[in-house]
Image: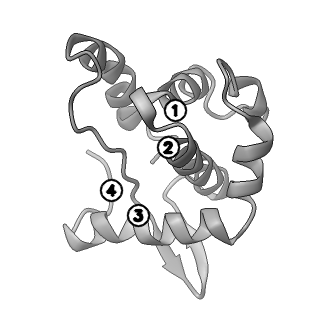
Amino acid sequence: MSQCPFGIKALNAMKEVLAAFDNKINFKVNFIGDEKDGKLTSMHGQGEVDENIRELCAIKYYGKDYKYMDYVLCRNADIKNPDWKKCAINGIDAAKIEKCSTTDEGTKMMTENIKIAKSLGIGASP
C-alpha cells in the first residue's frame, strides 16, 4: 500500500539495500488491495489506489536498475500530496506515467498485482 506508513519505511530502506548490492538483487514491489464490483479498492482510499497504479507504471517503464525508485522515494517524502508529477524526476516521464495509470493498462496491472497478496492471504499491513 503506497500510503501505508510501514510500506513507506520499507521502501525507503531499500535505497540503501539496493546500493549495497549494486542493484543486482531480485527486488519486486507488490501491493495489497481488492476489487469490489469491478472497482479497485485499498485500505487508505482512492488516492492510494491511484498512487499504487502510478508506481506500477513507473516500475514497468523504469524498472532497469530500479530507476522507478527515484519516483517512489520522492513520493514517499510527501505521499498524500496530489502533485505526484513533481516526482517525475531524473528522466522519468510524467506523461508516460499518467497515460499508463489512467487507462486500462494501469488498471489491469493493479488487478494482476493484488492477486499475489490475496494468494498469500495478506490483506493488511502490520
Disc 1 is placed on an element classified as helix
Give amino acid for label 3. Asn
Give amino acid for label 2. Ile
Q: Label 2 neighbourhood size at 10 Å, few (<14), some (14-19), many (20+)?
A: many
> Is there CB contact under 8 Å for labels 2 and 1?
yes
**Residue 68 location, x and y as percent?**
51, 32
At horizontal 73% and vertical 66% (from top left) the residue drawn is 103
At horizontal 80% and vertical 42% (from top left) the residue drawn is 95
Depth check, mark 1 against mark 3: the one in front is 1
Instruction: State the residue position of label 2.
Output: 59
At horizontal 29% and vertical 66% (from top left) the residue drawn is 116
Which numbered disc, 4 or 3, marks the residue that appears first in the sequence?
3
Position of residue 7 relative to residue 57, above or below, is above
Label at residue 68: 1
Which numbered disc, 2 or 4, marks the residue that appears first in the sequence?
2
Instruction: State the residue position of label 4.
Output: 124
**Residue 34 location, x and y as percent?**
46, 72
> Is there CB contact under 8 Å for labels 1 and 3?
no
Q: Label 1 neighbourhood size at 10 Å, few (<14), some (14-19), many (20+)?
A: many
Depth check, mark 2 against mark 4: the one in front is 2
**What is the CA distance from the residue labelled 3 to the residue labelled 2?**
12 Å
Quadrant of image for the C terminus: top left
**What is the CA distance from the residue labelled 1 to the residue labelled 3?**
17 Å
Instruction: State the residue position of label 3.
Output: 113
